[in-house]
Image: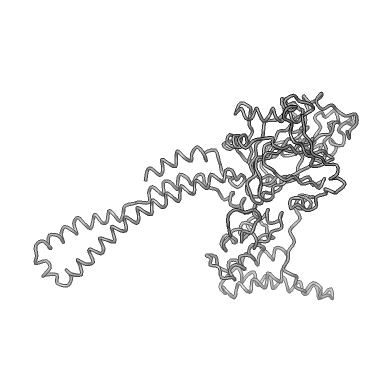
Amino acid sequence: MKRWVSTLLVAWFGVLGCVQAEFFTSIGHMTDLIYAEKDLVQSLKEYILVEEAKLSKIKSWANKMEALTSKSAADPEGYLAHPVNAYKLVKRLNTDWPALEDLVLQDSAAGFIANLSVQRQFFPTEEDEMGAAKALMRLQDTYKLDPDTISKGQLPGTKYQAMLSVDDCFGMGRSAYNEGDYYHTVLWMEQVLKQLDAGEEATIAKAEVLDYLSYAVFQLGDLHRALELTRRLLSLDPSHERAGGNLRYFERLLEEEREKMLSNQTEAGLATQESIYERPVDYLPERDVYESLCRGEGVKLTPRRQKRLFCRYHHGNRTPQLLIAPFKEEDEWDSPHIVRYYDVMSDEEIERIKEIAKPKLARATVRDPKTGVLTVASYRVSKSSWLEEDDDPVVARVNLRMQHITGLTVKTAELLQVANYGMGGQYEPHFDFSRRPFDSGLKTEGNRLATFLNYKNEQDAFKRLGTGNRVATFLNYMSDVEAGGATVFPDLGAAIWPKKGTAVFWYNLLRSGEGDYRTRHAACPVLVGCKWVSNKWFHERGQEFLRPCGSTEVD
């Protein structure tokens, strides 16, 4: 048994020791859970073998004793007349039965329990389960998938079959309910009823499902259906106290509603509304546009615009290193100019960067616009790490390559950021540049007056760096994604799909130094697959002669 624990300590402390919950934010870290679960299964099987061997001994002893006692009990005196039988009886009761007792009391589960206890400290938490449930709901909304489709695992590009049981669907609905998300509670509890009615076995009772569902539809304003569902619940469980109280409360509310309608001499409000509920409006104004682009809908790549997009060989303004081996460059968008470069990173470089980044991955943060403090946010679901050139020669090599391609210096750029997206991993629409002026004196000189007036309460995110704002973004795609995961620009109506080994590049600032607000972009939720990216943010300082300023604010 001790071997299990020692194996575990060696194999998993190093891998999981740096991870503190939030597994759902990184598929890369979730793969560690696969190996942890495999180790537990092996440990469990070894425990079962020991238990089976123990039970086999006990069963053999029982059969032996059953045959002996049936013979001795038939003629006790005659049996004991033989002195050997008398001796063996005394010996059995004094020695053999206590030995059997020791065998029965032997704790063969100790090794397995020790293994489980050690690994449990690295298990996903309640937060992870809630995050995973929210991720499925995010995919459900973004890609317009109904619960039945998700429950059957009918997703595009999937390699393995996966289905949700009745109890799994109930878990989804309960998670939504606990978050006060009654819209998704209704959708998933209705799916539970559908699968129960189809005869699927479950540990959850239909009455409990109706309890959640009736209250959720009431919260969505459907009083008539809440009353109907509560009556169904009471028909299954007449002693359900809460349902009885709810029934009386709903009937009273309905009566008050009738009286109000009658007093207004109208019956319009008495009609039972259909049990179709709209998704609540949230904080993101461009939600519909953003999600449509994620689905590949609403892309504004008109034939006229497409004629302005070209492919070419790029030598980085005649950079010597690229004259011999130029990169293939493809226009993704004309204005603002967004380009894609091919074969920027080799498979070997990608794997090495992932290897050195993985132990450093931590929940990606955003900067609070009011306080300037870094914090986690539900609209950014991924883990990231920052790599220095000293970490590995491949980092220095990739940095230099990005400098050659862009013609910008990396001396004032940020470290190479590597990100791995989790379940439904996303980063909702955002700007890469800081929207606050770097010098408060500029507010009266007109150069960044509009920016200052619109975002005067936003903290300067990069002032402490002393390198100016983020002038450009270079985004490397380090994996293909089977479905979802596009980079979209809602204001443009542009969608760019990940291709392993390619990179996209755009300027965040106009030549005047003003932010180009058209570059507001997002990373769409990953529907199927594991998305890895790395990016380099170039800053203004050091680029003065490499990308000269324009003469007007709109240059």
The answer to whether residue 364 of the structure is visible from this angle is no
State the residue at coordinates (19%, 66%). Answer: 68
Q: Which residue is drawn at 69% across and 27% down?
A: 400
Query: In this rendering, would 172 be left or right of 504?
Result: left
Residue 306 seen = yes
Give the residue drawn at x 85%, y 37%.
Answer: 453
Q: Residue 21's x, y, as percent?
A: 57, 44
Q: Tell me: residue 381, above or below residue 343.
A: below
Count of labels in the image: 0
- Does residue 450 appear left or right of residue 229 in this picture? right
List the single residue furthest toward the front: 324
Quadrant of the drawing holding the C terminus = top right
Task: Say which of 157 and 510 sits in front.
Answer: 157
Q: Position of residue 540 (x, y in %)?
A: 78, 28
Give the camera-side residue of 265 and 308: 308
Residue 260: x, y in percent?
79, 72
Is residue 118 placed above or below 214 in the rendered structure?
above
46 vs 485, left or right, is left
Here the colouring is one colour
Residue closest to the eye, 70 or 445: 70
Where residue 162 appears, as percent x and y from the top left, is: 58, 57
Q: Quadrant of residue 437?
A: top right
Depicted 403 relative to depicted 177: above or below: above
**In which quadrant of the rendered view does residue 345 lie?**
top right
